[in-house]
Image (tube, helix red, strand yellow):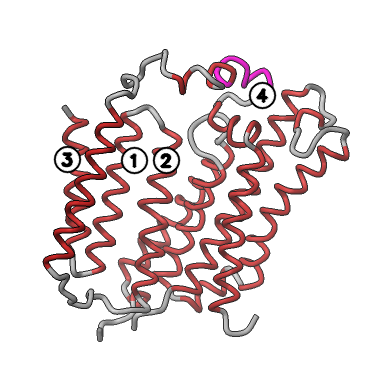
């Protein structure tokens, strides 16, 4: 029951954020969208993802978007979309979502232990990760040890993003 | 907007002074505790950066730069990645593959791996916090 309520809030937040002409309100709505998403992750027992969503999605992204907004105008410029375009967009979106919904029919049930995703490497992580890495939380074991290269790459991406902003915006280096 | 700057509002100043140490302590906890509970370098680093950004929002950019200079935040951003990469190279020196923590010379492979993961979590956290602080200083503009 609560899952449906959360998903409903999620959709309402997303729609409201799209409709909002006031960009500050839209950013706030996106922040609450991320926060509800974090609760959904918690409901799915994915606490690490929920933690990331709450701190990165709801926290720092909102701050950085507001910081960006301080350099631009607060209101969206009023430009009306022609009716023909709206109809075309609507048809494309509906077709895409129909295809996506059709795709979910073949998916395994939620939490089905026989699902392919749980058959490949997941048993190894669950059974051997403590032995092999000495870390209790196997999400951390996967991130830091089994997929160490990925994590190093992600850190380098964040570092690179920071350097790019410095090169672009800093007057004197 | 002809309001007084945020830094003159006594309630915001007092609340920020009260909250920032706890936010930063929580960030350190999240980074250091990533191998046992949920959390880790990314989340902890973001919280660390956000705590500092709260300070900068309340007290202003100049006051914030007194606390963490431009050189300091640049060094933080760089030091984290270097710490991570250096841990990988230490594994090569110890005779393993790059980032093969178990080859580090500690009493057991598990202990070596655990300690190395602890170190790289700090590396991630430091870089993320440094970059977030830098981004805010560069993108944000003070509304007077």
Tell me the tag on residue A58. none
Secondary structure state at the residue bearing disc 4 = loop
Q: Quadrant of the C terminus of chain A?
A: bottom right
Examine the image and state in which quarter residue A113 appears.
top left
Nearer to us: label 3 or label 1: 3
Pointers 4 and 3 in contact (C-beta within 8 Å): no
Specify whether disc 2 shares its chain with disc 1.
yes
Q: Any magenta on residue B106?
A: no
Secondary structure state at the residue bearing disc 2 = helix
Pointers 4 and 2 in contact (C-beta within 8 Å): no
3D distance between C-alphas at marks 3 and 2: 21 Å
**Compared to A149, does A30 lie above or below?**
below
Compare residues A36 and B47 and report the one nearer the observer: A36
Examine the image and state in which quarter residue A81 appears.
bottom left
Pointers 2 and 1 in contact (C-beta within 8 Å): yes
Specify whether disc 4 shares its chain with disc 3.
yes
Q: Quadrant of the N terminus of chain A?
A: top left
Pointers 3 and 1 in contact (C-beta within 8 Å): no
3D distance between C-alphas at marks 4 and 2: 22 Å
> How far across and down, in percent of the image, does residue B121 sit?
62, 42
- The residue that label 1 is drawn on is A38
3D distance between C-alphas at marks 2 and 1: 7 Å
Compare residues A6 and B26 and report the one nearer the observer: A6
Residue in view at x 37 percent, y 78 percent: A71
Left or right: A168 in relation to A149: left
Read off the chain for label 4: A
Specify whether disc 4 shares its chain with disc 2.
yes
3D distance between C-alphas at marks 3 and 1: 14 Å
- Which segment did they paint magenta? A125-132
> How far across and down, in percent of the image, does residue B74 sit?
64, 67
Tell me the tag on residue A8. 3
């Amino acid at each position: 029951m609560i899952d449906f309520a959360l998903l409903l809030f999620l959709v309402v937040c997303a729609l409201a954020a799209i409709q909002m002409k006031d960009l500050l309100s839209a950013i706030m709505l996106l922040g609450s969208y991320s926060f509800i998403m974090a609760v959904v992750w918690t409901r799915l027992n994915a606490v690490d993802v929920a933690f990331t969503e709450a701190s990165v999605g709801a926290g720092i992204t909102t701050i950085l978007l507001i910081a960006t907004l301080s350099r631009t105008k607060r209101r969206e410029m009023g430009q009306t979309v022609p009716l023909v375009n709206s109809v075309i967009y609507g048809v494309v979106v509906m077709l895409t979502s129909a295809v996506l919904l059709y795709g979910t029919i073949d998916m395994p049930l939620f939490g089905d232990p026989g699902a392919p995703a749980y058959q490949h490497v997941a048993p190894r992580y669950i059974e051997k990760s403590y032995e092999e890495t000495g870390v209790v939380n196997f999400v951390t074991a996967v991130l830091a040890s089994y997929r160490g290269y990925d994590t190093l790459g992600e850190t380098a991406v964040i570092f690179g993003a920071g350097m790019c902003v410095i090169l672009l915006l800093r007057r004197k280096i | 907007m002809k309001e007084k700057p945020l830094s003159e509002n006594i309630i915001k100043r007092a609340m920020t002074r009260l909250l920032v140490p706890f936010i930063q302590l929580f960030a350190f906890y999240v980074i250091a505790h990533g191998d046992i509970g949920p959390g880790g370098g990314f989340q902890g680093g973001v919280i660390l950066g956000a705590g500092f950004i709260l300070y900068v929002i309340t007290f202003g950019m100049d006051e914030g730069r007194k606390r963490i200079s431009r050189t300091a935040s640049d060094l933080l951003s760089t030091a984290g990645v270097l710490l991570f990469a250096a841990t990988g190279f230490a594994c090569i020196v110890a005779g393993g593959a790059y980032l093969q923590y178990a080859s580090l010379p500690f009493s057991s492979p598990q202990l070596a791996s655990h300690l190395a993961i602890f170190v790289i979590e700090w590396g991630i956290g430091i870089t993320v916090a440094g970059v977030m602080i830098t981004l805010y200083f560069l993108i944000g503009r003070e509304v007077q």
